[in-house]
Amino acid sequence: MSHWLPPRDEVLAAMQRIYGFRMTTTSGGNISLRDEEGDVWITPARIDKGSLRRADIVCVKRDGKSEGLHKPSSELPFHQAVYAARPDIRAIVHAHPVALVAFSMTREVPETRLFPQARMVCGQVGFAPYALPGSKELGESIARTFRQGHHCVVLENHGVVVGGKDLNEAFQRFEALEFAAKTIIKARQMGAVRYLREQQLDQFRHRKISLAPVPLGPPKTAERELRRELSEFVRRGVQQRLLISTEGSFSARLDAEAFIITPSGKDRFTLQPDDFVTVSGDYCSAAQQPSRATLLHRAIYEKHPTAKAIVFAHPVNATAFSVTNAELDARTIPESYIFLRDIGRLQHEALYDDGSIITKQLAPDRPVSLLENDGVVVMGTSVLDAFDRLEVLESTAEALINSRHIGPLTAMPESVLAELRAAFFGTK
């Protein structure tokens, strides 16, 4: 969703992404964008979201007249009401993602203090009482809640409405809120959910990366290949919902001193090879701001020479374990234990020291750890190895949560684990 795209293309791209990620249905949801002239570009009424074309997007002029092949969405009145109530909002996403719909059915909103990025992106979530879809009353109810300063509003028995200064920000809030809602639902199946204190959130807000930007020459062939590989795996991670557009960092080692890493504040789904930041010692390439987790990546590489790739991520099921005290036990099937070994757990404060705590926790034979209220960290011997471990971790976490609905977990006994260690690692 580039600012250089015409409005109809921005709206189309956002809806294709939401529908492609199964965050709405063929007939559900609508998206709008208010341009610099005050015209509103909006998805049409009763048109298949899965086959939407740019020509299907409707333009509603400031005088109320519409231009296009179709009628505008029947929910246009509440879009207009929100724009009137909040001049700072220039884009709106409304959809029916399953986790947020579940919250709407119970008159509850997700608590975004679940992890720092969710709070920073979404803020505190509002709630709008039920009114007939498409009615003036619904528009008034939603606009009233937006006037209170909320950027995200759960609609009673309906879904969610999210606004932003542009469509990229609105989409990112929508995506992050649905992810938080899914994580809470999964976590509640395992016990009490832990939320962050304001002091802990402040640690995240004030975290800075003090690296000196320097211009670098054209990358060599090996770096160009690594950048391409990393961009492909980051995109795959977003497609598989292991990462989302605002969360997670992925890096790969270039040599003994340098590595490349995802930039800060840029949509992970759209990253290109030249978007990644090169970091070497106390310096970084000048093109982009590196991830907030860069210093932790650097500390891990310095401590563990065999580490060739590192990913900090927030896959829903594994993250659900990180916000509870439930154990994520990899002694479930051979693949899980071979890839994950004994999974560690780090307190939230470990993310804000000099990296000494996290580097002691991670090791070649302990490549995975939960990060209290901040997802997981995975270390690998290559980009593929790190990504593979992340996939196995999330699959294992989901299977463990699902097993709770079937019966008591039967973990593999020590004799089996010893056999696996001898066969695959040459140890007892």
Image (cartoon, rainbow, N blue to C red):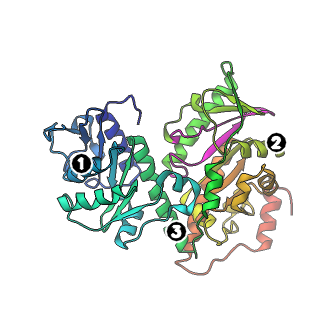
For label 3, the crowd category at 10 Å Cα-Cα, with few meaning under 14, some 14 to 19 and many 20 or more, is many
Q: Amino acid at mark 3?
A: Lys
Q: Is residue 374 visible?
A: no
Among the two numbered marks 1 and 3 on one chain, the one whose residue lies closer to the N terminus: 1
The count of marks equals: 3
Q: Position of residue 407 (x, y in %)?
A: 57, 81
Q: Quadrant of the C terminus?
A: bottom right
Provide the residue designation for mark 2: 302
Q: Which mark is residue 186?
A: 3
Q: Position of residue 265 (x, y in %)?
A: 54, 40
Q: Please, is residue 54 above or below residue 372 in the view?
A: above
Foreground of the two, 293 or 20: 293
Range shown magenta: 241-268
Disc 1, SS: helix
For label 1, the crowd category at 10 Å Cα-Cα, with few meaning under 14, some 14 to 19 and many 20 or more, is some
Foreground of the two, 367 or 3: 3
Provide the residue designation for mark 1: 80
Name the residue furthest top: 217
Among the two numbered marks 2 and 3 on one chain, the one whose residue lies closer to the N terminus: 3
